[in-house]
Image (spheres, rainbow, N blue to C red):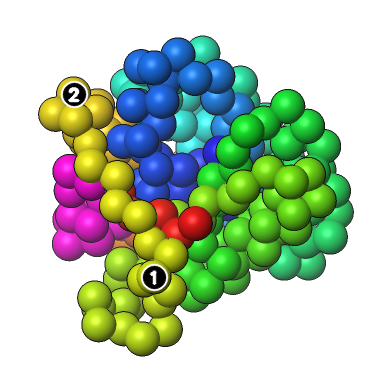
Protein backbone atom coordinates (compact mmCIF):
# COMPACT_ATOMS: atom_id res chain seq x y z
CA UNK A 1 0.00 0.00 0.00
CA UNK A 2 1.63 3.16 -1.24
CA UNK A 3 0.62 6.59 0.11
CA UNK A 4 2.02 10.01 -0.74
CA UNK A 5 0.94 11.27 2.70
CA UNK A 6 0.08 9.32 5.87
CA UNK A 7 -3.71 9.16 5.52
CA UNK A 8 -4.07 8.67 1.73
CA UNK A 9 -4.13 4.88 2.11
CA UNK A 10 -6.78 4.98 4.83
CA UNK A 11 -8.96 7.50 2.97
CA UNK A 12 -8.84 5.63 -0.31
CA UNK A 13 -8.37 2.01 0.72
CA UNK A 14 -8.83 1.75 4.50
CA UNK A 15 -11.99 -0.33 4.40
CA UNK A 16 -10.44 -2.82 2.02
CA UNK A 17 -7.36 -2.81 4.24
CA UNK A 18 -9.58 -3.87 7.13
CA UNK A 19 -11.02 -6.69 4.99
CA UNK A 20 -7.55 -7.85 3.94
CA UNK A 21 -6.16 -7.68 7.48
CA UNK A 22 -9.12 -9.69 8.79
CA UNK A 23 -8.35 -12.31 6.13
CA UNK A 24 -4.77 -12.62 7.34
CA UNK A 25 -3.18 -10.92 4.33
CA UNK A 26 0.30 -9.57 5.08
CA UNK A 27 0.47 -5.84 4.47
CA UNK A 28 3.27 -3.37 3.88
CA UNK A 29 2.41 0.32 4.18
CA UNK A 30 4.76 2.73 2.43
CA UNK A 31 4.61 6.41 3.40
CA UNK A 32 6.44 8.32 0.68
CA UNK A 33 6.42 11.61 2.61
CA UNK A 34 5.71 12.25 6.28
CA UNK A 35 3.00 14.75 5.38
CA UNK A 36 4.90 17.50 7.16
CA UNK A 37 3.73 20.28 4.82
CA UNK A 38 -0.06 19.98 5.09
CA UNK A 39 -0.33 23.43 6.76
CA UNK A 40 2.46 25.55 5.21
CA UNK A 41 0.96 28.88 6.34
CA UNK A 42 0.10 27.89 9.91
CA UNK A 43 1.76 29.69 12.83
CA UNK A 44 0.47 27.15 15.34
CA UNK A 45 3.46 25.47 17.07
CA UNK A 46 2.26 21.95 16.25
CA UNK A 47 2.64 22.77 12.53
CA UNK A 48 6.41 22.33 13.01
CA UNK A 49 5.90 18.80 14.29
CA UNK A 50 3.41 17.48 11.78
CA UNK A 51 5.65 14.62 10.67
CA UNK A 52 5.59 13.09 14.16
CA UNK A 53 1.91 13.91 14.65
CA UNK A 54 0.89 12.30 11.39
CA UNK A 55 3.04 9.23 12.06
CA UNK A 56 1.16 8.68 15.32
CA UNK A 57 -2.18 9.27 13.64
CA UNK A 58 -1.45 6.64 10.98
CA UNK A 59 -0.27 4.20 13.65
CA UNK A 60 -3.55 4.64 15.49
CA UNK A 61 -5.60 4.40 12.29
CA UNK A 62 -3.95 1.13 11.25
CA UNK A 63 -4.68 -0.27 14.70
CA UNK A 64 -8.34 0.69 14.30
CA UNK A 65 -8.39 -1.06 10.92
CA UNK A 66 -7.13 -4.24 12.57
CA UNK A 67 -3.88 -3.81 10.65
CA UNK A 68 -1.51 -3.02 13.53
CA UNK A 69 0.82 -5.78 12.36
CA UNK A 70 1.32 -4.16 8.92
CA UNK A 71 4.95 -3.51 8.14
CA UNK A 72 5.56 0.23 7.84
CA UNK A 73 8.15 1.85 5.60
CA UNK A 74 8.83 5.61 5.59
CA UNK A 75 10.74 6.95 2.60
CA UNK A 76 11.00 10.56 3.90
CA UNK A 77 10.63 12.23 0.50
CA UNK A 78 9.91 15.95 1.11
CA UNK A 79 6.17 16.64 1.26
CA UNK A 80 5.04 18.47 -1.87
CA UNK A 81 8.10 17.41 -3.88
CA UNK A 82 7.40 13.79 -4.77
CA UNK A 83 7.59 14.44 -8.52
CA UNK A 84 11.16 15.72 -8.17
CA UNK A 85 12.13 12.36 -6.65
CA UNK A 86 10.01 10.19 -8.91
CA UNK A 87 12.72 8.12 -10.56
CA UNK A 88 14.46 7.34 -7.27
CA UNK A 89 11.07 6.61 -5.71
CA UNK A 90 10.22 4.12 -8.46
CA UNK A 91 13.47 2.32 -7.64
CA UNK A 92 12.58 2.11 -3.93
CA UNK A 93 9.09 0.84 -4.73
CA UNK A 94 10.46 -1.75 -7.16
CA UNK A 95 12.62 -3.11 -4.34
CA UNK A 96 9.69 -3.06 -1.90
CA UNK A 97 7.48 -5.02 -4.31
CA UNK A 98 9.93 -7.93 -4.38
CA UNK A 99 7.61 -10.18 -2.34
CA UNK A 100 4.22 -8.61 -3.14
CA UNK A 101 1.23 -9.96 -5.05
CA UNK A 102 -0.51 -6.60 -5.38
CA UNK A 103 0.33 -2.90 -5.08
CA UNK A 104 -2.22 -0.16 -4.37
CA UNK A 105 -1.31 3.49 -4.90
CA UNK A 106 -2.90 6.91 -5.42
CA UNK A 107 -4.56 7.48 -8.79
CA UNK A 108 -2.08 8.80 -11.35
CA UNK A 109 -4.50 11.58 -12.46
CA UNK A 110 -5.83 12.63 -9.04
CA UNK A 111 -4.99 16.31 -9.72
CA UNK A 112 -2.68 16.49 -6.71
CA UNK A 113 1.01 16.58 -7.74
CA UNK A 114 2.23 14.26 -4.96
CA UNK A 115 -0.58 11.75 -5.49
CA UNK A 116 0.04 11.68 -9.23
CA UNK A 117 3.81 11.21 -8.85
CA UNK A 118 3.20 8.46 -6.28
CA UNK A 119 0.82 6.73 -8.68
CA UNK A 120 3.19 6.99 -11.64
CA UNK A 121 6.12 5.66 -9.59
CA UNK A 122 4.04 2.75 -8.30
CA UNK A 123 2.89 1.90 -11.83
CA UNK A 124 6.49 1.92 -13.03
CA UNK A 125 7.54 -0.30 -10.14
CA UNK A 126 4.64 -2.66 -10.72
CA UNK A 127 5.52 -2.93 -14.40
CA UNK A 128 9.15 -3.66 -13.55
CA UNK A 129 8.14 -6.44 -11.14
CA UNK A 130 5.10 -7.78 -13.00
CA UNK A 131 2.95 -6.89 -9.98
CA UNK A 132 -0.58 -5.53 -10.64
CA UNK A 133 -1.22 -1.99 -9.40
CA UNK A 134 -4.63 -0.77 -8.29
CA UNK A 135 -5.06 3.00 -8.14
CA UNK A 136 -7.29 4.61 -5.54
CA UNK A 137 -8.74 8.11 -6.02
CA UNK A 138 -8.64 10.75 -3.26
CA UNK A 139 -8.89 14.29 -4.58
CA UNK A 140 -10.80 12.96 -7.57
CA UNK A 141 -13.89 12.79 -5.35
CA UNK A 142 -13.59 16.53 -4.80
CA UNK A 143 -13.38 17.66 -8.44
CA UNK A 144 -15.07 14.92 -10.46
CA UNK A 145 -18.69 13.94 -10.95
CA UNK A 146 -19.89 10.47 -12.02
CA UNK A 147 -20.33 11.57 -15.65
CA UNK A 148 -16.82 13.03 -15.87
CA UNK A 149 -15.38 11.71 -19.12
CA UNK A 150 -11.81 12.13 -17.88
CA UNK A 151 -12.14 9.20 -15.51
CA UNK A 152 -11.47 5.63 -16.70
CA UNK A 153 -14.74 4.22 -15.42
CA UNK A 154 -14.34 1.11 -17.62
CA UNK A 155 -11.39 0.15 -15.38
CA UNK A 156 -13.16 0.97 -12.12
CA UNK A 157 -14.09 -1.61 -9.53
CA UNK A 158 -16.33 -1.02 -6.55
CA UNK A 159 -15.41 -2.82 -3.37
CA UNK A 160 -18.33 -3.22 -0.96
CA UNK A 161 -17.32 -3.04 2.69
CA UNK A 162 -18.77 -5.36 5.27
CA UNK A 163 -20.45 -3.60 8.20
CA UNK A 164 -17.43 -4.49 10.34
CA UNK A 165 -14.92 -3.09 7.83
CA UNK A 166 -17.05 0.02 7.37
CA UNK A 167 -17.15 0.59 11.12
CA UNK A 168 -13.39 0.11 11.34
CA UNK A 169 -12.76 2.56 8.51
CA UNK A 170 -14.93 5.29 10.04
CA UNK A 171 -13.14 4.86 13.35
CA UNK A 172 -9.76 4.99 11.60
CA UNK A 173 -10.67 8.23 9.82
CA UNK A 174 -11.23 9.85 13.22
CA UNK A 175 -7.55 9.26 14.00
CA UNK A 176 -6.42 12.04 11.67
CA UNK A 177 -7.06 14.96 13.99
CA UNK A 178 -4.46 17.14 12.26
CA UNK A 179 -6.35 16.84 8.98
CA UNK A 180 -10.04 16.70 9.92
CA UNK A 181 -9.98 19.48 12.53
CA UNK A 182 -8.47 22.98 12.34
CA UNK A 183 -4.88 22.93 13.55
CA UNK A 184 -5.44 26.12 15.54
CA UNK A 185 -7.49 29.29 15.30
CA UNK A 186 -5.34 31.34 12.94
CA UNK A 187 -5.13 31.73 9.18
CA UNK A 188 -3.60 28.65 7.58
CA UNK A 189 -5.00 26.40 10.30
CA UNK A 190 -8.08 25.32 8.36
CA UNK A 191 -8.95 21.62 8.28
CA UNK A 192 -7.68 19.89 5.16
CA UNK A 193 -10.60 17.46 5.30
CA UNK A 194 -13.68 19.30 6.57
CA UNK A 195 -16.88 17.23 6.96
CA UNK A 196 -18.01 17.66 3.33
CA UNK A 197 -14.70 16.23 2.10
CA UNK A 198 -14.54 13.51 4.71
CA UNK A 199 -18.00 12.35 3.64
CA UNK A 200 -16.51 10.94 0.42
CA UNK A 201 -14.47 8.53 2.50
CA UNK A 202 -17.09 7.54 5.05
CA UNK A 203 -19.17 5.62 2.49
CA UNK A 204 -19.64 1.85 2.72
CA UNK A 205 -17.69 1.12 -0.44
CA UNK A 206 -14.38 1.98 -2.07
CA UNK A 207 -13.50 2.42 -5.73
CA UNK A 208 -10.23 1.50 -7.40
CA UNK A 209 -8.98 1.63 -10.98
CA UNK A 210 -7.24 -1.52 -12.12
ZN1 LIG B 1 -2.43 12.95 0.16
Asked whether 196 falls inside the magenta stretch, the response is yes
* Magenta stretch: includes residue 143: no
Using the image, determine if residue 119 lies above or below residue 99: below
Q: Is residue 168 visible?
A: yes
Image point (63%, 33%), residue name: 101
Are the two marked residues, 1 and 2, in contact with CB atoms closer than 8 angstroms? no
Mark toward the viewer: 1 or 2: 1
Earlier-in-chain disc, 1 versus 2: 1
Q: Position of residue 69 (x, y in %)?
A: 51, 13
Give the labeled residue for mark 2: 164
| Magenta residues (range) | 193-205
Q: CA distance from mark 1 to mark 2?
A: 29 Å
**Residue hosting label 1:** 154
Residue 175 is at least partly visible in this image: no
Between 208 and 108, the one lying in front of the other is: 208
**Image point 67% across, 31% down: which residue?**
100
Amino acid sequence: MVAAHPDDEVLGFGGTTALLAASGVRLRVVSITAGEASHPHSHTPVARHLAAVRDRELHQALGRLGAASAQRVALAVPDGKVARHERELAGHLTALLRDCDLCVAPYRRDLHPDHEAAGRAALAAGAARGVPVWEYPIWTWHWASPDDGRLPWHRAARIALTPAAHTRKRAALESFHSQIEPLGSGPGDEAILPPAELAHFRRDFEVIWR
